[in-house]
Amino acid sequence: MYSRIHNRLGTAGMVVAVMALIIALAGTAYAAAGLSGKQKKEVAKIARKYGGRRGRTGPAGPEGPQGPTGPAGPAGKSGTSVKLSAAGGCPSGGTKLTLGSESREVCNGRQGPAGPTETVLPNGATEVGVWSFVGKEVFSTFANISYPLMVPSAPAFNWVFFGETNPNCPGSVSSPEALPGNLCVYAREVAHAGSGTNGAPEPPFGASLNPDPKAGLVMEFVIEAGAEGYGYGTWAVTASD
């Protein structure tokens, strides 16, 4: 490489180039006395070309040994807690927490209302729900109706298919209602099942399956041979002594 530069610049040019390189690397700003104008231009050109260039980054050195463990930190502040009575900012009581010079009260939640205690639906009250069934290639299938609260006495069964009316059932499948002492079963759709009018379920409507009609009933639907039967709707029952 040195020979190629020497042959290209000559002895005098080589001297100029070396001087320019030294000046560029040393970062010294001074005039090169005794140089001709052409040589000064060459020096400036070489200085611009090689001056200020950063060398390549060398490989990372080996990892040093682990340093010593630092000193232990100071002990934290000790906290205290005091139970608060039902007064002041905590109507239901709570706890006062103190950490150093800071204190905060944490209140207990409010007591929720008592849940219902009834197990029997009050006279004249109504409860509602939904029912459905699906069956395939079986002789019969069942839809269960279970009352959340038992009724005082067994209600009369009423089947109301979609679009029909019933004097004991003034509601509809989307808003089920029943007069006192009646269970109204509203059918939105029944397909390939039932032997009565409009797919009504088979009597006696689960009387033999449900030992207590005051708790609900089981409706039995006969599925057509080789078909898939299904049905769904709503119900309402109103208590009566």
Image (tube, rainbow, N blue to C red):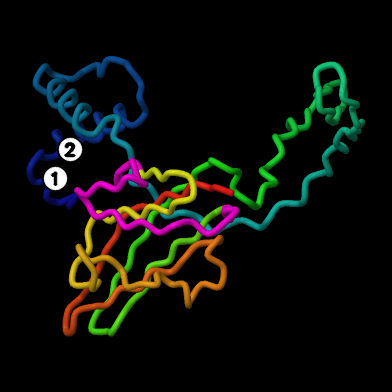
Q: Does the magenta stretch include residue 156?
A: yes
Element type at marker 2? helix
Q: What stretch is highlighted in magenta?
A: 149-175
Residue that numbered label 1 is attached to: 5
Give x and y (percent) for residue 8.
7, 42
Magenta region's main secondary structure? loop
Residue 112 falls in which quadrant of the image?
A: top right
- Please say if 81 is above or below 103: below
Residue type, numbered disc 1: Ile
User: Badge 1 local density, few (<14 within 10 Å), some, or many (20+)?
Assistant: few
| Disc 2 versus disc 1: nearer the observer | 1
**Which of these two is toward me, 150 or 155?**
155
Residue 200 falls in which quadrant of the image?
A: bottom left
Residue that numbered label 2 is attached to: 14
Whether residues under marks 2 and 1 lie with C-beta atoms below 8 angstroms apart, the answer is yes
- Please say if 142 is above or below 186: below
**Which of these two is toward me, 98 or 39?**
98
Cα–Cα gap, marks 2 and 1: 7 Å
Q: In this view, does 25 lie to the left or right of 68?
A: left
